[in-house]
Image (cartoon, rainbow, N blue to C red):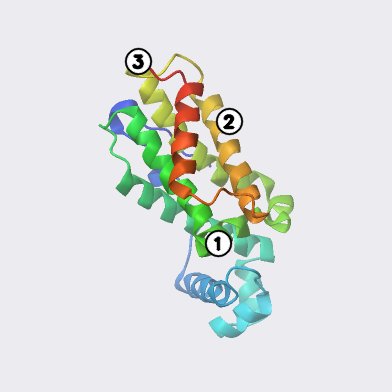
Amino acid sequence: MQPSATTCDDGIFSIASYHPSARDSETRRILTAAWRVLERSRFRSLKVRQVLAASSTSASNFYRRFPSKAHLLLALLEDEVQLVDRQLRDRIDPDAPVADQLGAWLRYNIGILYDHSRAQRTRLFLDRDLIDVLPEPVAVLFGIGDKQLSEIVRCGMQRRELEPGDPEVEAVLVGHLMRGLLTSGRNGGLPPDEHELVTQVHRFVLRALGHR
């Protein structure tokens, strides 16, 4: 179940071809209840018994759809990836210069770090219970963000706005940089000025990619 990339002419990569798990109305109701539980806890914890109460469903009904808490988190991660995809597509103009596209991508992702609620929501999906139990589907979903970036980089290379290279490898490296910033933010290591951080990271990424 791998998402397919678009061409440069098609603009930023979309997860439109990525098909999440089939969801009936009862599954959707459980997921809606899970989001409510998470919001009440400020995304600090998710307990199955609280989801059962919030969705008014039985344990047997729940576990038929989600064999474990990790499977529930995976379904929530699918929701989150689709939300991020829609928001990025609204913010990034595929016809703009690659420097502007990269700037929009960085502003969106760095903005998450400075928004406590969004940062907590994002860190939820770094849960070891999820990653250890379902490493492959989690890797596919995490990889979608890197794939979006790799398509921006690929377009920049095709337009000769960036030096030739491997767009997938370079996108992964930038993705690691962003995940490192997310970890730093958890430990209170972010600089106070969000705009200044965006500017510095944008400048660094453009240099690393050989922006002309």
How far apart in space, not on screen, are marks 2 and 3 (Cα)? 20 Å
Task: Give the labeled residue for mark 3.
Answer: 160
Q: What residue sits 49% from the left and 29% below the top?
A: 205
Considering depth in this image, is 143 or 52 the residue closer to the camera? 143
Q: Is residue 79 left or right of residue 103?
A: right
Label 1 Cα crowd, 10 Å radius (few <14 / some 14-19 / many 20+): some
Considering depth in this image, is 81 or 43 the residue closer to the camera? 43
Please state which amino acid type lies under the numbered disc 3.
Answer: Arg
Q: Where's the C terminus, which quadrant?
A: top left
How far apart in space, not on screen, are marks 1 and 3 (Cα)? 37 Å
Q: What residue sits 48% from the left and 70% below the top?
A: 28
Q: What residue sits 45% from the left and 14% below the top?
A: 164
Disc count in the image?
3
Q: Secondary structure at mark 2?
A: helix
Please state which amino acid type lies under the numbered disc 2.
Answer: Leu
Q: Earlier in the sequence, mark 2 or mark 1?
A: 1
Q: What residue sits 56% from the left and 48% below the top?
A: 191
Q: Do callouts 1 and 3 mark residues in contact (Cβ within 8 Å)?
A: no
Q: Earlier in the sequence, mark 1 or mark 3?
A: 1
Q: Is residue 65 above or below residue 157?
A: below
Q: Do callouts 2 and 3 mark residues in contact (Cβ within 8 Å)?
A: no
Which numbered dot is residue 121?
A: 1
How far apart in space, not on screen, are marks 2 and 1 (Cα)? 23 Å
Which numbered dot is residue 173?
A: 2
Q: Secondary structure at mark 3?
A: loop
Q: Is residue 148 above or below residue 109?
A: above
| Image spot of residue 45 (x, y percent) | 66, 70
Please state which amino acid type lies under the numbered disc 1.
Answer: Arg
